[in-house]
Amino acid sequence: MTHRWIITALGKDRPGIVAGVTKILYTRGCNLEDSAMTRLEGEFAIMLIFSASSSMNGVALRRAFAPLERRFGLVVHLKGLTPVESRPPRPRGRRCVISVYGADRPGIVFRISAALARARINITDVHTHRSVPARRRRGPSLYLLLLEVELPPGRTLPSLERQLKGTATRLGVELSVRPGEPNVL
């Protein structure tokens, strides 16, 4: 019998964090099932789900991560998942990708995500990136927002794009909607 866990680890980006986290899981017989790991400016963030034998308890796992927390200056959070939380979500519709691009300004993510929430469209993944101009170049920073969403039955890509275009125009950004690519993994 196995038990599933989710762990987050945050800290200053440096080599060895991924190896350190996954070594702890590997040496304790855990299986890494799903993960997202990324660098955000100078910080590194890990969020992953893993399974462990039911004999592995939270106290032992937390103790195993303590040396890694000290070595890398990480903040680690571990949470056991209930059987209900362990069920994979049912897709609520077709996947599509929304790209938003333009001059950086406050409110881009909020206004686009609020429009999606009003339309009852579920966001499944978000990526943003702000590019700062080089010192010799002057001008605004550019902002990119990529959203993966589930388009509910009965909604079309063109209707979603039309709905979001008004918000994009008010923000002064470009917006496009396209079908999501099938998962490769």
Image: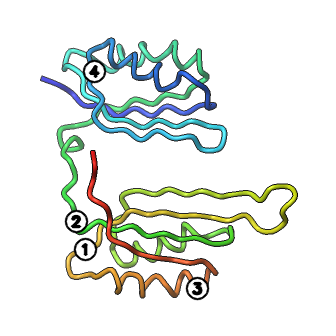
Q: State the image quarter where residue 151 is shown.
A: bottom left
Foreground residue among 147 and 3: 147
Q: Residue at x 86, y 55 (%)?
A: 135
Q: Residue at x 45, y 17 (%)?
A: 65
Characterize the local packing of mark 1: few (<14), some (14-19) or many (20 or more) Cα atoms within 10 angstroms. some
Label 3 is placed on what type of residue?
Thr
Q: Position of residue 60 (x, y in %)?
A: 35, 13
Its colouring scheme is rainbow
Characterize the local packing of mark 4: few (<14), some (14-19) or many (20 or more) Cα atoms within 10 angstroms. many
Q: Name the element at disc 1.
A: loop
Calculate the distance from the C-alpha at mark 4 to the C-alpha at mark 1.
36 Å
| Contact check, label 2 and label 3, Cβ < 8 Å | no
Residue 77 versus residue 114 in the image, above or below: above
Q: Name the element at disc 3.
A: helix
Q: Position of residue 73 (x, y in %)?
A: 61, 23
Label placed on residue 169: 3
Foreground residue among 181 and 122: 181
Label 2 is placed on what type of residue?
Arg
Q: Name the element at disc 4.
A: loop
Q: Name the element at disc 2.
A: loop
Side (left or right) of 158 relative to 175: left
Of mark 1 and mark 3, the one earlier in the sequence is: 1
Calculate the distance from the C-alpha at mark 2 to the C-alpha at mark 3.
28 Å
- Residue that extends furthest to the left in the rendered view of this protein: 1
Label placed on residue 152: 1
Calculate the distance from the C-alpha at mark 2 to the C-alpha at mark 4.
30 Å
Of mark 4 and mark 3, the one earlier in the sequence is: 4
Calculate the distance from the C-alpha at mark 1 to the C-alpha at mark 2.
6 Å
Of mark 2 and mark 4, the one earlier in the sequence is: 4
